[in-house]
Amino acid sequence: MRIASAFVAGGLVLGAAACGEAPKDDNNAGGNGGKKFSACMVTDVGGIDDKSFNTSAWKGLQEAKKENDKIDIKNVQSKAEADYEVNLTGFVNQKCDFILAVGGLMSDATKKAAEANKNQQFAIVDANPGVDNIYPMQFDTAQAAFQAGYLAAGMSKTGKVGTYGGLPIPPVTIFMDGFADGVAYFNKAKGKNVQVIGWDKAAQKGSFTNDFVKQDEGKKVSDALVAQGADIIMPVAGGAGLGTTAAAQASNGKYSVVWVDVDGCESTPNCPALVTTVVKNIPDAVKDAVLKAANGEKLQAKPGFVGTLANNGVSIAPYHDFDSKVPADLKAEVDKIKADIAAGTITVTSKAQPTK
């Protein structure tokens, strides 16, 4: 199983007032003399080092630059939602060839900027604003989260597993839906009754930090889930989830974690506490989009890109430190689920799934 490692700031025009950080340039100083193609990224409030989708998207730009040295890349980090539109417009004014918005919360701002600048190529991760000059990159993470839910149910000693989110938005709840369905599938297959704490798929209600940054908020929510008996928890809360991974590692095995977005053994310091990660292959999607655009290809808003288990757009990461702890038969069942979902034998549904 292949994984790719990988969850805004006025004043980008000289002399304008700045609300956020200055753009980071990662320019290639090589002297080929050719015209440069500028790919510019606006982060969500989690920032470039969120160990999640912002980190993943930036890695995609870096990989595109490695492959084509005529690509210049830069980013600006959003401090608050009010920065999104200002930062996007700032990159328009800088005449960036390709402007990437990262995260579903940026959908409205990106749509507004794109409609005001019809000839500008935009792209966005985790949303589809439905505008011709915005290339959407979305991920059916419910599919891989289904595998993770089945795995968690099979590994739980207490018969209770938990999940929580940052905010009740589609790029978050899609993980939680898939996870809950994977647990339900395990229960049906095995005649068990493993409970999911923190998310009710039918009611679309559950536990949230209302934040993607504050680790203490993540720890607070996961502490409550553990107190209710959960021994495996999947946080879908960006950097806030690091509060859970750190506490899990400190618990000496009382509970463990399923991470999301980027393989947690490559992106967090808490690998010993991680059973696996529900991976969203943002780097390859972003890299591919930037390389195509730099080569003069028109990026089509329809159909855009939807990552699935079948096209390796989503996956679960290797088990790393848990490899010897996961029974061989459970590993085989999780692999079989991947094949069945990819083949359409198992259908995974979520209200938050991207349209294909």
Image: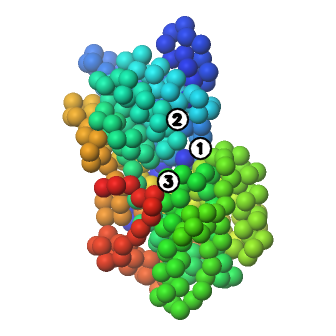
Q: Quadrant of residue 128?
A: top left
Marks 2, 1: nearer the viewer: 2
The answer to whether marks 2 and 1 mark residues whose Cβ atoms lie closer than 8 Å is yes
How far separated are the C-alphas under marks 3 and 2? 18 Å
Give the camera-side residue of 104 and 152.
Answer: 104
Secondary element at image label 2: loop
Marks 3, 2: nearer the viewer: 3
Residue shown at 49%/13% (left/top)?
13
Q: Callout 3: few (<14), some (14-19), or many (20+) C-alpha neighbours within 10 Å?
A: some
Identify residue for label 3: 170
Question: Which dot marks residue 43?
Answer: 2
Residue shown at 47%/20% (left/top)?
90
Identify residue for label 1: 50
Q: Position of residue 260 (x, y in %)?
A: 54, 58
Looking at the rendered structure, the kind of residue marked 1 is: Asp
The answer to whether marks 3 and 1 mark residues whose Cβ atoms lie closer than 8 Å is no
Which of marks 1 and 3 precedes in the sequence? 1
Q: Is residue 11 above or below residue 64?
A: above
Looking at the rendered structure, the kind of residue marked 2 is: Thr
Quadrant the C terminus occupies: bottom left
Q: Position of residue 292 (x, y in %)?
A: 26, 37
Q: Position of residue 226 (x, y in %)?
A: 74, 70
Residue 339: in sight, yes or no? no
